[in-house]
Amino acid sequence: MILGKNFSNLKVILVEPSGPLNVGSVARLCSNFEVDELRIVSPKCDIFSLEAKKMALKGHKFLENCKIFDDLQKAIFDCDLVLASCGRIDVNKNSFFGSSEDIFDWTLSFKKINNLAIIFGREDRGLTNSELLLANKIFNIPTSQNNPSLNLSHAVSIALYELNKSSKRNFDQELKVFNLASSKQIHDSFLEIEELLLKVGYLLKHTSKAKISKFKNFILRANTSMHEVNVLRGIVHQINWFLNNSKRN
């Protein structure tokens, strides 16, 4: 695989693409960089159109075999590590960003990453804040502040090139075993935490999403392990058990 031994099962995920030419170009890039799978969430164009197929060229198999989902959470259900691209400059100030080069270099600190996904947003407005929170890491591709947004297929090409370039570097460091909590584990945990905090009155319904997002950002920045998330969920389950049983007495 062109992306090196520490990456496997690389999935490129497009969210609501609206241009068949872009989709076809991305399919071609998947072939260029030997991506394992193209996934598309709620496409807003005919991804099997003649326009898309003409742009795909040797990447036509990625169009034919792409998996289509109606929800981003479903598209990343089997992914261990999820990276998201963002070109917007108006995102929440609490969001954690890194340059594409820094984030891809960070992935090299692990011996092996299975099921790596890279998410790219809509051509006109990218990913929403809630969608960005589904990623373990968010990266941007440095461009002019006057015009920071890149064409979708151009962003994909730069990201795959930089990921490929990073994977070929030799770093003099001891590699760690990959044990980060998956984005799905973190997402499911925070659904339970939000429900608990609403139950005990710490959160209010109309502000709960914003407060939980800040807490979730903190957990993502901390590179939380699977074990740590399981401990957190265990605490939540025990508190819920106590609250439910104390009501019966």
Image (cartoon, rainbow, N blue to C red):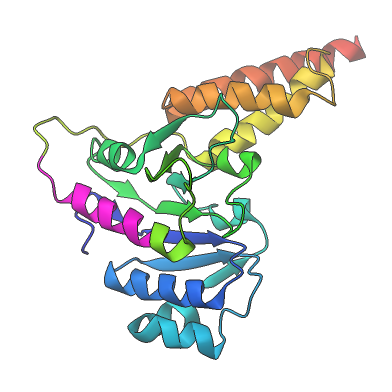
**Is residue 61 shown left or right of residue 68?**
left
In magenta segment, residue 20: no
Q: Residue furthest front?
A: 146
Residue 69: quadrant of the picture: bottom right
Q: Main secondary structure of the magenta part?
A: helix
Of residue 170 and residue 124, the one placed in the foreground of this image is 124
Question: In the displayed structure, would residue 230 be above or below residue 177?
Answer: above
Residue 47: where, in percent of width, then height?
A: 57, 79
Residue 99: quadrant of the picture: top left
**Residue under the image location 57 percent in, 60 percent down:** 123
**Is residue 123 shown left or right of residue 79?**
right
Of residue 164 and residue 178, the one placed in the foreground of this image is 164
Question: In the displayed structure, would residue 126 be above or below residue 89?
Answer: below
Using the rendered image of the protein, determine whether residue 105 is visible from the camera's viewpoint. yes
**Residue under the image location 36 percent in, 34 percent down:** 179
Residue 118: where, in percent of width, then height?
A: 43, 53
Of residue 70 and residue 16, the one placed in the foreground of this image is 16
Of residue 217 and residue 112, the one placed in the foreground of this image is 217
**Is residue 244 shown left or right of residue 122?**
right
**Residue under the image location 38 percent in, 34 percent down:** 98
Count of labels in the image: 0
Residue 77: where, in percent of width, then height?
A: 55, 52
Question: In the displayed structure, would residue 92 be above or below residue 118?
Answer: above
Residue 1: where, in percent of width, then height?
A: 22, 64
Q: What quarter of the picture does the C terminus occupy? A: top right
In magenta segment, residue 159: yes
Q: Residue furthest bottom?
A: 50
Residue range highlighted in magenta: 156-170
